[in-house]
Image (spheres, rainbow, N blue to C red):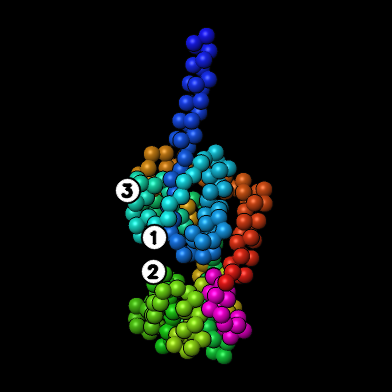
Amino acid sequence: MMIRLLLPLATGLLFGSLANAASIRLVTGDEYAPFTGQNLPNGGMLTELVQQALQQAGHQTSLTWLPWKRGYQATLKGQFDATYPYLPTTERQADYLFSAVLYETTQRLFSRAGQPLEPDLHQLVGKRICLPLGWQPPPRLAPLLAAGKLQRHEPQDLTTCARLIDLGRDDFFVADSLLGERAIHRSGLAVERFSESKGVVGSNSLHFLVPRNRPGAQQLIEEFDKGLRLLQENGEYARILRTHRQHALNAD
């Protein structure tokens, strides 16, 4: 009788331990709408995607919000299991394993409607790019910046960039179409006051990262990628993107 009573308890403890073992500690940064943000629905587009992909793989998750640099370093030190979303760079790839693409951005120039600009390097000489603090310039524009032929201005966010361009203080900013349109909307300015380039400056992919030094890192990446594929196959991925796009363009 005692053995029968203990078996359910032992089974419960076993499955409780397994559930805890499967819980993935996530960290990301704030104010990167529509991708991440504490005030966004479900933490933003990519927060929802990451948590849903891990759920598909059988993992529970916990999420912490920290300043970007602090969260990145804390993950490397083992305080978190994974972080997101990040662009691939040589330095990052030395420390982290990267997932399949979470979201791909296509970058274009946003300039004043009366003075439209295209990503022609000769046309951009002597211009002033508005690049929010902490953002990296597209590699295509790096030579102009390094040579001092393109001036760089670094305000706090992209919405400020939209206002500065409208005032004529800066000439253009570079962003994915969704981010650019959202910044203009949030600035209170009419979209007709801006020109979005037909030419593409570059494209970037955003990823889920797991430190290489984490035990089971490769397995976690593979499980995450499998969960992400399931979301893409069952239509949930497209639904999540569509919902957050609509919110981004309609939000105040």
Residue placed under numbered mark 1 in the picture: 68
**Type of amino acid under label 1:** Trp
C-alpha distance separating marks 2 and 3: 22 Å
At a point 45% along the width and 61% down the height, the residue shown is: 30
Classify mark 1: helix, strand or loop: helix
Q: Quadrant of residue 89?
A: bottom left
Q: Are marks 2 and 1 in contact (CB under 8 Å)?
A: yes
Is residue 101 shown to the viewer in this render?
Answer: no
Could you tell me which residue is drawn at 51 percent across and 25 percent down?
Answer: 12
What percent of the width, then of the height, locates residue 34? 54, 64
Near-viewer residue (44 or 142):
44
Q: Give the percent coordinates (x, y) of residue 217.
A: 42, 42
**Which residue is labeled 3 in the image?**
77
From the image, tell me which residue sits under label 2: 134
Q: Amino acid at mark 2?
A: Gly
Query: Overall secondary structure of the magenta stretch?
Result: helix
**Residue 21 counted in the magenta span:** no
Q: Which residues are magenta?
A: 179-195
* Neighbours of disc 3 within 10 Å: few (<14), some (14-19), many (20+): few
